[in-house]
Image: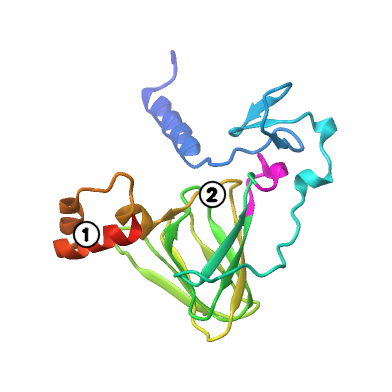
């Protein structure tokens, strides 16, 4: 830029890069942008086509039955009902989503990451042991046992978990700062990738015996 000192140009570029890097769901430039599955007379925004706003109705912003308990009859003893833009089309461009978490006694939502959203959790029933791990080099575990009415926040992109420490069912609601927060379940992704990661990589990374690695890959494949 002619007439502008180089260090100011560099500073401006760094500031721009930082602002772009910190942006996840962009702020909407309209009241709403209800997602539709067809491109006919629609505009493509945030990975979805949008219907004519004049055709929007209450059902575009509605979901029925989140008060109904979900089945926890599985190996983990938990069930997540996630309401993203794929379930509530009116969430498109709004930057939020919601999940109901059901736990059997001692049920677990295993360590996982939401790459595009922070999360705030509120417990409705039961007692949950929750926590997250800070990034390198500290890898510090921050945990809390929550009871009905308690709230806990998980920062974006950090490994976290929820575990029912009681002998009764537990229920919690999670609010996430993205219409599509994404989910990376650590064990599933590492040991259940498709195609599988070369066992030699996992043996060295986790300092495990080859038989253990092959067993885990079979469990999660």
Q: Position of residue 189 (x, y in %)?
A: 36, 53
Identify the residue at horizontal 49%, vertical 58% (top origin). 155
| Labelled disc at residue 20 | none
Residue on which the image places disc 2: 181
What residue sits right under mark 1 in the picture? 214
- Residue 6 rendering spot, x and y as whole percentages: 37, 23
121 and 83: which is toward the camera: 83
Is residue 96 covered in magenta?
A: yes
> Is the stretch drawn in magenta largely helix, strand or loop?
loop
- Please say if 61 is above or below 158: above
Which residue is pictured at 63% across the width and 44% down the height? 86
- Residue reaching furthest to the top: 2
Q: Quadrant of residue 122?
A: bottom right
Q: Residue 118: where, in percent of width, then height?
A: 53, 55
* Residue 28 position within the rendered picture, expressed as x and y whole percent measured from the top left: 68, 36
Residue 134 sits in quarter: bottom left
Q: Residue at x 33, y 45 (%)?
A: 194
SS class, disc 2: loop
Does 126 appear above or below 97?
Answer: below
Based on the picture, tell me whether residue 208 belongs to the magenta stretch: no
The magenta stretch spans which residues? 87-97
> Does residue 116 lie above or below 39 as drawn?
below
């Amino acid at each position: 830029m002619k007439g502008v000192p180089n260090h100011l140009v560099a500073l401006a570029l760094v500031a721009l890069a930082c602002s772009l890097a910190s942006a996840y769901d962009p702020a909407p430039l309209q009241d709403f942008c209800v997602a539709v599955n067809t491109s006919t007379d629609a505009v493509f925004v945030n990975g979805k086509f949008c219907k004519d706003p004049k055709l929007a109705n209450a059902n575009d912003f509605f979901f029925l039955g989140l008060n109904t308990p979900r089945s926890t009859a599985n190996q983990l003893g938990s069930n997540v009902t996630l309401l993203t833009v794929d379930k509530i089309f009116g969430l498109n461009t709004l930057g939020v989503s919601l999940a109901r978490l059901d736990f059997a006694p001692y049920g677990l939502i295993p360590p996982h990451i939401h790459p595009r959203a922070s999360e705030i959790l509120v417990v409705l029933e039961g007692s949950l042991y929750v926590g997250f791990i800070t990034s390198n080099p500290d890898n510090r575990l921050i945990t809390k046992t929550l009871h009905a009415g308690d709230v806990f926040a998980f920062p974006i992109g950090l490994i976290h978990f929820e575990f029912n420490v009681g002998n009764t069912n537990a229920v919690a609601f999670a609010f996430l700062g993205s219409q599509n927060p994404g989910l990376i379940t650590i064990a599933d992704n590492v040991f259940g990738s498709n195609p599988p990661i070369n066992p030699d990589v996992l043996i060295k990374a986790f300092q495990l015996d080859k038989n253990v690695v092959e067993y885990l890959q079979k469990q999660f494949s």
